[in-house]
Amino acid sequence: MHYLKSNKHLMKRSLLIVIGIVLVTIFIFDRTPNKSFRPIGDNCDLRTYCGSVEQGDGVSLAFVEFDDQGQYYDQRQSFQALRLVRDAVNSGGSAVDVFVFVHGWHHNASVSDSNVKQFRDFLVLRRQYAAHKAVGVYIGWPGETLRFPLKYLTFWSRKAAAHRIASGSVQEFFASLQQIKLDQGRSDRTPSSVPKIVPKIFVIGHSFGGLVAFQANSQSFALRYGEAAFENRGGPSAPGLGDLVVLINPAIEAARFSSLHSLWSEYPNDPFYSPVMVTVASRTDWSTRFLFPLGVLSGTLITNQLRPGEWSDALHTVGNAESYLTHNAFVDARGSVVICERPQELSLRKAPFWFVSADSAIIDGHSDFNAKKLLALFDTIQRDVGAKTPGGLPSCASLGLPKFG
């Protein structure tokens, strides 16, 4: 009897050792390479595009990659991307739309990455439906460090990395991109006989990429809005990055918006309701609705000190915090995307940010990047924002739409 117990104990111990060896082996040898996936190469002549630029199907797509500490893998990628935008603007002809996409967790800039293909498909569709030049910039960073099955244990490290990326060289890249737009808008930029093309710049961030896109620009949002509030207390306009920042299922704690919340609560936005940023959160995004709070909770309990009233905003993403949601989005009977206002105090203040709760027909789950649905959503947002409707959008109740949220 003693022999059987000893043998079972030995078998359990051996099994644990084998499992441990397997996990360590996976951790050491099944890591995503720490490298640039779009290398330019030492022999690249920057007078021509090479390595980090794709061109075809009527669109141009540049890749700019950042390492885990937020530094450029190769700053020449940035130079090529900015030159691509300048060339599109200076070549004349049709208007230029520049889309910057920042990917999230489990993604990078590799040729096989699903986000790369989906973003390229989006650009091609946009080019087909709009008579504009389409220029894309894909912001890559190490969103995937370990492969299956250990990749799900990287939540905390990739969230921390996203914050490092946001405070690193990507800020300089965004500023350079903004400067191209400002330069084109100067009255002395071109002779009066030459029609000027001022590019429209749109930034799209997904998941932790939404965190990067917002956090990299949050300080400038606050500074610009605070300055506008000081100059025009009756209703300041809120200049933002480019023409619009759109965050899809952003993995950002609602608490990150508290400082901006205090600004717009005191000084509501202009009467034409011109947001500088729109977040769109799917109601079926279980990753941010349930898994994100669980991931944040463990770190919060160990490292953070929160006052009683701060727990909800610290644990919930901004797209799942009831007090922040301002709009709902549906697909109507004709198949068109409709955005309407929720009956919330924050919405009535005409804040320079929209927080949209979207039906699954628009975005189903966390990573639904169907190019056609994304284009329909984006065109609706662009149309509603560009309309500058006095008093804002119609209420959901007035359209007879069901209430959810």
Image (tube, rainbow, N blue to C red):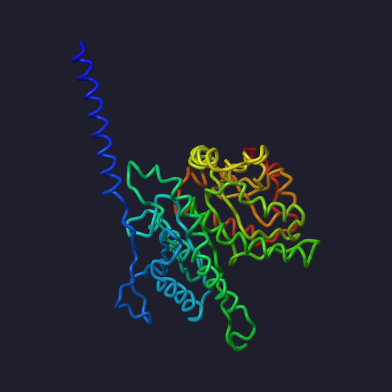
For the N terminus, the quadrant is top left
When the figure is inspected, residue 267 is found, relative to residue 175, above or below; the finding is: above
Q: Residue furthest right?
A: 234
Left or right of 37? Residue 309 is right
Question: Residue 27, percent across and down?
Answer: 30, 46
Question: Residue 254, percent across and down?
Answer: 61, 46
Residue at image point 61% right, 48% down: 356
Question: Residue 404, percent across and down?
Answer: 62, 38
When the figure is inspected, residue 155 is found, relative to residue 39, above or below; the finding is: above
When the figure is inspected, residue 306 is found, relative to residue 44, above or below; the finding is: above
Q: Nearer the viewer, residue 151 or 245?
A: 151
Left or right of 261? Residue 189 is left
Q: Nearer the viewer, residue 274 or 300?
A: 300
When the figure is inspected, residue 401 is found, relative to residue 115, above or below; the finding is: above
Residue at image point 24% right, 29% down: 15
Question: Residue 352, percent across and down?
Answer: 68, 57
For the C terminus, the quadrant is top right
Determine which quarter of the picture holds residue 54.
bottom left
